[in-house]
Image (cartoon, coloured by chain):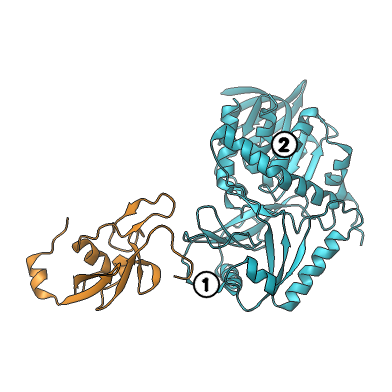
Amino acid sequence: MFRRLPEALSAARVVRLVVDGEAVEAREGDSLAAALLAAGRVACRTTPVGGAPRAPYCMMGVCFECLVSVDGMGSRQACLVEVREGMRVETQRGARELGR
Amino acid sequence: MRRDEADFAVVGGGLVGTAVAWGLARLGRRVLVLDEGDVAHRASRGNFALVWVQSKGMGMPRYATWTRLSSDSWAGFAAELARETGVDVRFERPGGFSLALGEAELEKRVAQIRRLHNQPEMVVDNGFEVVDRARLDAMLPGLGPEVAGGVYCPFDGHANSLKLLRALNEGLRIAGATCLSSCTVDAIAPVAGGFRIDHRGGVAMAGRVVLAAGIGNARLAPMVGLRAEVRPQRGQVLVTERLQPFLRHPVVTVRQTDEGSVMLGDSQEEAGLDETVGTPVIATIAERATRMFPLLGRANVVRSWAALRVMTKDGFPIYERSAAHPGAFLVTCHSGVTLAAAHALHLAPMLDAGALPADFAPFGARRFDVPATA
């Protein structure tokens, strides 16, 4: 669905994440939401009531569609989090669990 | 200009008005509901949605009995609404708690509830239990270290009050009632055979009129020889993001809704008609909630709001028939959710019969005429 511009590919260093237990490559400076989209992991969560899949949408902190768990903390807005080497990301299935 | 005729005109389209109106419509009456619209203060959109028994009736045992009757009627009420409208209002009665932070709070709480139940005219046994910390831990998850104990009542429950309002409106529609919005009532005049009501959308003629307009009752009641000394009392509420179910029992200030949000309440503030949210109050609400359930501190709060309770001087409802104009009735309370079942299934038939029973005398406004005794 998305691919990186060639100049972006050559410029930035590779950052490795773990998404749902699998290795995913991102680029330094990516927001987590952009990295997930670029890696083809479009559906980042399912909704709490209807269970419908959701993807990052506004990419600027407004719509709260891109909620994921980052390093054990649930409901983080992936578009406002910058990727870091070794970051552990989990997609959220339904409502967040209290305390996670 | 629109002209309506009805057996009953109900002024007020909140939970009190629609519950009474639905109760009358289900008895086959032609009902007209006149709602003021979104300029009204809308306690029915801002409440905490408890169906609550344990603390009710100190100073008026009749209120405890009435509240319990409503709690006991709620399951049937919800089932009938679901059958008729397809809307499940998500009523549950798993028993509820009030929790004490520290021994001093617990002692105070237990003394209050004992005093309530030891009143000589208290005829209903609400089965409250004082629960110590060890037993609490088996019933509620992840309690903070300061929680000393609590009071449990098996008849406490909760519902989804927005779905309730929706179901009542849908039920009224199905029953053929007329519900008009943006119809502030300007004048109610007793005329031959009933009442003439002038409102912003036109004129209505009704055999009887029921005032269920919340704070607006204060203005309307004198038009039909009644008095409604009610004042707004502000309550503020916080709500979290939706979370996996973790809290089965409602706590008086913390409850998890049917869709997973956790509501945190609630304040009692004398602030007139001011509906603004204040940081000091919501900070206190959040602080107490996280002392009860520390993990809530990690949840995201997504909304906060303030709403206005409709309070009488003693906090009890007023149910009264006008002596001067016997077809006019006043209904006001601050527990529109808890009492919805009683209003629909028990009060409406009384209004339909044209009189309140003798044992409703304690609910009359005359009680405010005598100085309170110790």
- Type of amino acid under label 2: Leu
> Is residue B190 rendered to the left or right of residue B279?
right
Q: x and y percent of residue A90 in the render?
A: 33, 67
In the image, are marks 2 and 1 on the same chain?
yes
- Disc 1 target residue: B295
Q: x and y percent of residue A59 in the render?
A: 27, 61
Q: x and y percent of residue B187 in the render?
A: 69, 33
- Disc 2 target residue: B345
> Is residue B170 rendered to the left or right of residue B335?
left
Colour in which the image shows chain A: orange
> For mark 1, does the 10 Å Cα neighbourhood hold few (<14), some (14 to 19), or many (20 or more) residues?
some
> Is residue B261 rendered to the left or right of residue B199?
left
Q: CA distance from mark 2 to mark 1?
A: 41 Å
Q: Are marks 2 and 1 in contact (CB under 8 Å)?
A: no
Q: Quadrant of residue B16?
A: top right
Q: Tell me the subunit letter for badge 1.
A: B
